[in-house]
Image (cartoon, grey):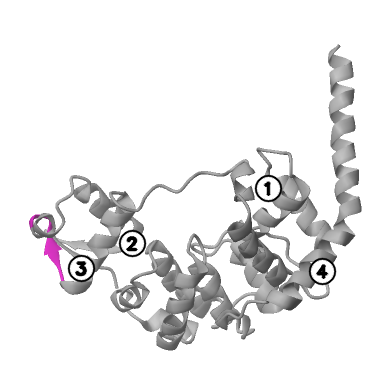
């Protein structure tokens, strides 16, 4: 009985694989046709400067495009190169970053700029294996930088891309793994012009979220984001904001400004992560 069950499972998998392969030409045509008529204009798409594209990809992590569109030009104007960013005190970087959330990305960018200047003579490496080891940059962000900055056929996945492939190739499935999706990403990739192909996929995915129930809910890794209000993220943001307004503060003074029981633990976490420095009884933003 077990033997027959195994054979049936393998047969079903092979059928799905065959069907997906047959659907690929129509899928690619559909995505390209949509993109020709609905291409989105974004400032980071109007440059091939690897540094500026790297900044945009870090900003876009866990953040809506609309918010990045407002903040990205300000950030690039303030820090137009890794040399400028590396020389700038963290307090100044965080003041420009305010409104983006997930402040750890700002300190990651500062560390990245330092690394680029010290180890790569101010040039962003075009090797994804190197990039994915940079602070705040994993395999998928590294792949995106390689595709958009250097137009190399890197295989990666992000929210909109995941949405597109689940919608088209896994209509009646739940618990879809990224491994399954990445196989299709690689099969459909335009190796001659991966930059434009990924733009097309992302724009199509951004459209889908407005038209259908989010297909990403059927991803194996889907989790609903917790509310910002009342979260540790909110407390961390308040700590940074207060220190941008005050040179240094003691725990007592912090508690007068932020009346939250989780305040001390979040301050300790921020010290450990390199955001804050403790000097005696006072806390300051790291430089």
Where residue 222 appears, as percent x and y from the top left, is 56, 44
Residue pointed to by mark 2:
274
Asked if the residues shown at circle 3 and circle 4 are in contact, with their CB atoms under 8 angstroms apart, the answer is no
Q: Which residues are magenta?
A: 247-252
Q: CA distance from mark 4 to mark 2?
A: 41 Å
Q: Quadrant of residue 207?
A: bottom right
Task: For residue 151, say whether it is visible.
Answer: no
Residue pointed to by mark 4:
190
Q: CA distance from mark 1 to mark 2?
A: 32 Å
User: On screen, 11 above or below 6?
Assistant: below
Q: Which mark is residue 178?
A: 1
Task: For residue 286, say whether it is visible.
Answer: yes
Residue pointed to by mark 3:
243
Where residue 168 appears, as percent x and y from the top left, is 76, 52
Looking at the rendered image, the disc whose residue lies closer to the viewer, 4 or 2, is: 4
Q: Which mark is residue 55?
A: none
Q: Earlier in the sequence, mark 4 or mark 2?
A: 4
Q: Earlier in the sequence, mark 3 or mark 1?
A: 1
Per the image, label 4 sits on a secondary structure element best described as loop
Per the image, label 2 sits on a secondary structure element best described as loop
Q: Earlier in the sequence, mark 2 or mark 3?
A: 3
53 vs 1, left or right, is left
Taking the spot 26% from the left edge, 55% from the top edge, the residue there is: 235
């Amino acid at each position: 009985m077990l033997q027959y069950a195994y054979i049936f499972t393998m047969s079903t998998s092979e059928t799905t694989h065959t069907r997906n392969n047959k659907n690929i030409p129509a899928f690619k045509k559909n995505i390209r046709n949509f993109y020709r008529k609905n291409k989105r204009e974004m400032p980071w798409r109007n440059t091939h400067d690897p540094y500026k594209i790297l900044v945009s990809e870090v900003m876009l992590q866990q953040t809506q495009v609309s918010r990045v569109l407002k903040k990205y030009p300000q950030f690039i104007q303030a820090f137009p190169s890794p040399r400028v960013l590396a020389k700038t005190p963290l307090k100044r970087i965080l003041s420009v970053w305010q409104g983006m959330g997930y402040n750890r990305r700002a300190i990651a960018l500062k560390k990245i700029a330092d690394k680029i200047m010290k180890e790569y003579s101010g040039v962003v490496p075009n090797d994804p294996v190197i990039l994915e080891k940079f602070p705040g940059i994993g395999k998928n962000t590294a792949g995106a930088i390689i595709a958009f900055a250097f137009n190399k056929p890197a295989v990666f996945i992000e929210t909109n891309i995941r949405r597109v492939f689940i919608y088209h190739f896994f209509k009646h499935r739940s618990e879809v793994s990224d491994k399954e999706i990445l196989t299709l990403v690689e099969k459909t990739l335009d190796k001659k012009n991966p930059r434009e192909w990924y733009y097309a996929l992302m724009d199509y995915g951004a459209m889908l979220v407005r038209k259908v129930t989010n297909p990403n809910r059927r991803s194996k890794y889907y989790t609903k984001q917790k509310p910002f209000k009342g979260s540790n993220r909110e407390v961390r943001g308040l700590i940074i904001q207060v220190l941008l307004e005050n040179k240094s503060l003691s725990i007592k003074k912090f508690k007068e400004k932020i009346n939250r029981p989780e305040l001390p633990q979040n301050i300790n976490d921020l010290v450990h992560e390199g955001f804050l420095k403790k000097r005696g009884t006072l806390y300051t933003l790291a430089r």
